[in-house]
Image: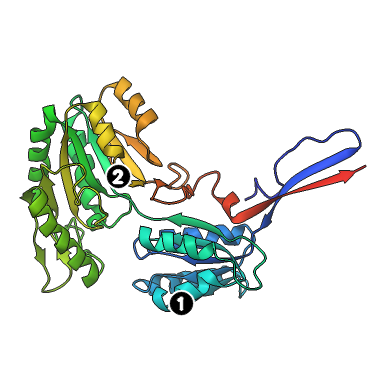
Amino acid sequence: MLRLKDGKPVESRPGEFNQYDYLPIGVSVVISPWNFALAIMAGTTVAPVVTGNTVLLKPSSNTPVVSYKFMEVLEEAGLPKGVVNWIPGSSADIGDFLVEHKDVELISFTGSKRVGTDIMQWAAQIQDGQYHMKRVIAEMGGKDTIVVDDEANLDTATDAIIHSAFGFSGQKCSACSRVIAVEGIYDELVKRVAARTEQLTVGDASDYHNFMGPVIDQKSLDKIKDYIEIGKEEGRLVIGGHTEETVGNFVHPTVFADLAHDSRVMQEEIFGPLVGFAKAQDFDQAIEFANATEYGLTGAVISNNRMKLEQARRDFKVGNLYFNRGCTGAVVGYQPFGGFKMSGTDSKAGGPDYLVLHMQGRTVSEHL
């Protein structure tokens, strides 16, 4: 913001001085998700604040306490009252009211594709007394693919898949839920991933010896269980496929193989510890299959062939693309984050263009 506060240089000419600067956009509604309950909520709240806007913060009804503690931090830091306003509650009860209100000028949303697209439609409807077009920043999830070439280091590929698919119990919009492997290494890769998956421990997340904790709630558990049954019909269950529900919503890491790239398990966002494998004849087809989804958030390519990596750089249509590592773990300032297609408006959170989305550019021209 210190770099943006004085605007950007534009040309002036004899007898005329021109200035380009930024103004706050106005009242901003921030609707944050339950996963990354601090990071996403705090980032999407502070961005409109530092650009001069007021905020209505509507946290996920699953994780309101984290945002309440964040509000205490803001007050302790001296933020004036009324700049950020904490309004917890059910999205079904208050979400529509906030999005449609005539005084709201910006909506920053992180969540599902269904809700995000609904918000885009609601925001486009002009209300009585509304004299502006609402701006929407939306991050709406993904169906993220790791492509494994037949010239890949399979140890690197296995590590990337395990941590990207099962870290945080697969509850990341960037989680690997699809693997497209070239047929020459397909069977060996599935074997290696299965062996590593078998070693993962599931249990109380406060015990750091456990690799995975539970999923967020019963609704999520039921959805994942439904997709496990779909996977059994569409492909081959390699490992996992069962739950433990006596003490929590625990889903064991699950791997399906021999899926068609356009099957439901390979196309629909599941948001849990389930990954599917599909086979490609060659690298060209692998990239084709990787792109054959409505989402475009993250992706990774594992290959030791520089020409193939450059081919993926050109042709793999995702907002965050990683080479020879997993497809999760973007760090602010290092990997600005946001996706293409139905993954959202490509806001690139944490990047050089992000704050500008919360402001309006203005030109002032003075005749001298």
Query: Which residue is under mark 2?
Result: 293
Task: Tell me the quarter of the image containing the C terminus.
Answer: top right
Secondary structure, mark 2, is loop
Check disc 2 and give the amino acid type: Thr
On the picture, is 356 further left or further right than 118? right
**Residue shown at 20%/37% (left/top)?**
180
Q: Percent from the top left, x then y, of residue 69?
A: 44, 72
Q: Locate residue 166 relative to residue 83 in the image: left or right.
A: left
Q: Residue 192 in the image: x percent, y percent?
A: 10, 39
| Amino acid type at image mark 1 | Ile
Which residue is nearer to you in this view: 365 or 70?
A: 365
Q: Residue 94 shows which numbered tag?
A: 1
The correct choice, above or below, for 15 with respect to 7 in the image is: above
- Residue 239 image position (x, y, % from top left): 7, 51
- Say which quarter of the image contains residue 92: bottom left
Query: Is 308 placed left or right of 116 in the picture?
Result: left
Nearest the viewer among 89 and 92 is: 92
User: Mark 2: few, some, or many residues within 10 Å (few <14, many ≥20)?
Assistant: some
Q: Residue at x 41, y 73 (%)?
A: 91
Which residue is drawn at the image coordinates 42% and 79% (left, top)? 93
- Crowd class of label 1 (few under 14; some 14 to 19; many from 20; radius 10 Å): few
Q: Is residue 38 visible?
A: no
In the image, which disc is placed on residue 283?
none
Q: Are marks 2 and 1 in contact (CB under 8 Å)?
A: no
Type of colouring: rainbow
Look at the numbered disc 1 and give the secondary structure of its residue. Answer: helix
Where is residue 323, by image quadrant? top left
